[in-house]
Amino acid sequence: MLTAAELARRLRQQAELGAGALFLEHLSRAEALGLARKFAARAAASAATVREPASPTGEPGLPELGRRRARGAGRSAARVESGTRAPAQPAERGATFDERELTGWDHADAYREVRDTAFGCVRCRLHEGRSHVVFSDGNPQARVMVVGEAPGAEEDRKGLPFVGPAGQLLDLLLATVALSRDSVYICNVVKCRPPGNRNPLPDEIETCLPYLRRQIELVAPEAILALGAIAVHTLLGRQDAIKRLRGVVHRYEGIPVVVTYHPAALLRNPRWTPGAWEDLQLLRRTLEGERGTSLL
Ligand code: URA
């Protein structure tokens, strides 16, 4: 089993050598998940105890990459139509974490408004079966926004996106480019769990889309990582298979979009993992291009 320190060392070596070798293909699913769990546990511990997250490897010398300077006023944004208000969402880790990250942010009030509107949303049938509206996790002032499909059972229970096995793999993938859950912003196209984990229906996506649009406007990420077909098709307005869309940087309203497989699909098809690694490298290069700084 690779330790987090070994992982970081290998990443640095690969970056220094410009190597095309893919360490992830040498990891079994159990190893990858074990590693991802470690990252998840560390992120949870650091979120509970310190304000500034540790680097994903915990090693000195790896810069914190996801944070960025406070932004000035962003682009003007369309309002999200609110449905009839339902009772407020109970405070969850995601909500309190957001609160902390909103301090001193120009868009804090607008962000709270859209988030609280979503927490009370009854605009489509999905509100009937939900335990929680799953709005986001991570840092609303992050450089990178990760967009998934819809909450699963675990996410619905906890009120946070990507907290099940797919989320653990996502944590690991992010760590390969020195990003952590706390240094990106994570959300889904659809904020409430579709029953039985079915795909969200087109009308559910359409109804929920104003929330995602508004999140993107306010967070104004430097790059978006789109996970899986629903996120990719929704953001790009194209129905092509993921494998045809990977490998190039697309744009959503001028923001670079990097496309990759959904982590749940990677768990079912581990042979796609090297491709996901390449996609994360494309995300890294895209961010470096935006900022002109190295991520590793
Ligand atoms: N899959 C998603 O697309 N989103 C989640 O939050 C969890 C699993």
Image (spheres, rainbow, N blue to C red):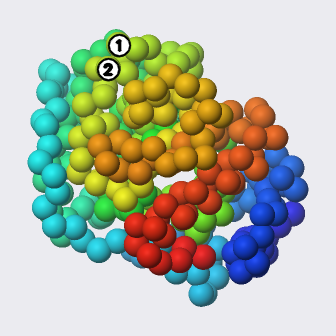
Q: Residue at x 64, y 82 (%)?
A: 59
**On the image, numbered disc 1 is attached to which residue?**
203
Residue 242 image position (x, y, % from top left): 60, 32
Q: Residue at x 73, y 73 (%)?
A: 18
Instruction: Give the residue type at disc 2.
Output: Glu
Residue 134 image position (x, y, % from top left): 39, 37
Secondary element type, mark 2? helix
Could you say which quadrant of the image residue 107 lies in?
A: bottom left
Q: Is residue 31 left or right of residue 119?
A: right
- State whether residue 193 appears in this view: yes
- State whether residue 158 appears in this view: no
**On the image, numbered disc 2 is attached to which residue?**
206
Q: Residue at x 34, y 56 (%)?
A: 221
Count of residue discs: 2
Could you say which quadrant of the image residue 280 lies in?
A: bottom right
Residue 87 or residue 204, whichever sits in front: 204
Which numbered tag is attached to residue 252? none
Q: Residue at x 25, y 31 (%)?
A: 210
User: Tag 1: Cα neighbours inside 10 Å, few (<14), some, or many (≥20)?
Assistant: few
Residue 9 image position (x, y, % from top left): 75, 78
Residue 84 or residue 182, whichever sits in front: 182
Residue 138 image position (x, y, % from top left): 42, 56
**Ligand 1 within 8 Å, label 1 CB:** no
Secondary element type, mark 1? helix
Q: Is residue 10 left or right of residue 246?
A: right
Question: Marks 1 and 2: CB-CB under 8 Å?
Answer: yes
Residue 105 or residue 122, whichever sits in front: 105
Name the quadrant of the N terminus.
bottom right
Instruction: Give the residue type at disc 1.
Output: Asp
Relative to 243, residue 19 above or below: below
Q: Is residue 292 left or right of residue 26?
A: left
Could you say which quadrant of the image residue 259 lies in?
A: top right
